[in-house]
């Protein structure tokens, strides 16, 4: 809860029932620097910078292609990506992964969903690299 008694934006229920429901993702922050900034106090800026750079490398390799994975493999990778994304402040990527993880319980990601994930990971890499350079 915030001081005004409302739920924070990132805790809204964002389960997508249809492709139209993904449109609300743009209502959320792409990146919240407050999240990784909290880790700087404990880990130091060099370590947070290394973590951000490692995550960007993983996005380009391990998480670059979901199309040839089984439904179960897609779901597992989305779950891992979701957790790593929020830890680095990538709020919108976290929410998309959550939506896709729920939606691919019974069927593989479709082309539209794969493109959305690809587009958002590319944007996330850009913003995370900018953040790293600022440290």
Image (cartoon, rainbow, N blue to C red):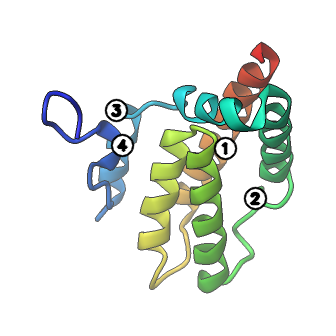
Q: Which residue is mark 3?
A: 27
Most extreme residue toward the left is 5
Location of residue 88 with respect to 69 vertically, above or below: above
Local crowd size for mark 4, using a 10 Å CA cut-off: few (<14), some (14–19), many (≥20):
some
Report how far apart the C-alphas of labels 1 and 2 lie in the structure: 9 Å
Where residue 63 is drawn, which disc sits there? 2
Q: Which residue is mark 4?
A: 10
Report how far apart the C-alphas of labels 4 and 1 lie in the structure: 18 Å
Q: Earlier in the sequence, mark 4 or mark 2?
A: 4
Q: Secondary structure at mark 3?
A: helix
Where residue 121 is drawn, which disc sits there? 1
Location of residue 94 with respect to 90 vertically, above or below: below
x then y, percent, for residue 120: 60, 41
Report how far apart the C-alphas of labels 3 and 2 lie in the structure: 24 Å
Dividing the picture into quadrants, the one containing residue 37 is top right
Report how far apart the C-alphas of labels 3 and 1 lie in the structure: 17 Å
Q: Earlier in the sequence, mark 4 or mark 1?
A: 4
Report how far apart the C-alphas of labels 4 and 2 lie in the structure: 23 Å
Q: Secondary structure at mark 4?
A: helix
Local crowd size for mark 1, using a 10 Å CA cut-off: few (<14), some (14–19), many (≥20):
many
Q: Secondary structure at mark 2?
A: loop
Q: Secondary structure at mark 1?
A: helix
Q: Earlier in the sequence, mark 3 or mark 1?
A: 3
């Amino acid at each position: 809860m915030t001081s005004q008694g409302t739920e924070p934006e990132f805790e809204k229920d964002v389960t997508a029932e249809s492709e139209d429901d993904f449109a609300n993702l743009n209502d959320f922050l792409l990146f919240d620097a407050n999240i990784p900034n909290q880790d700087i106090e404990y880990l130091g800026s060099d370590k947070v910078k290394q973590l951000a750079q490692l995550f960007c490398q993983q996005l380009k390799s391990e998480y670059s292609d979901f199309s040839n994975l089984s439904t179960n493999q897609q779901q597992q990778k989305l779950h891992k990506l979701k957790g790593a994304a929020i830890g680095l402040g990538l709020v919108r990527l976290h929410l998309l992964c959550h939506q896709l993880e729920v939606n691919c319980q019974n069927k593989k990601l479709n082309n539209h969903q794969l493109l959305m994930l690809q587009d958002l990971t590319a944007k996330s890499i850009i913003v995370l690299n900018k953040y790293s350079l600022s440290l």
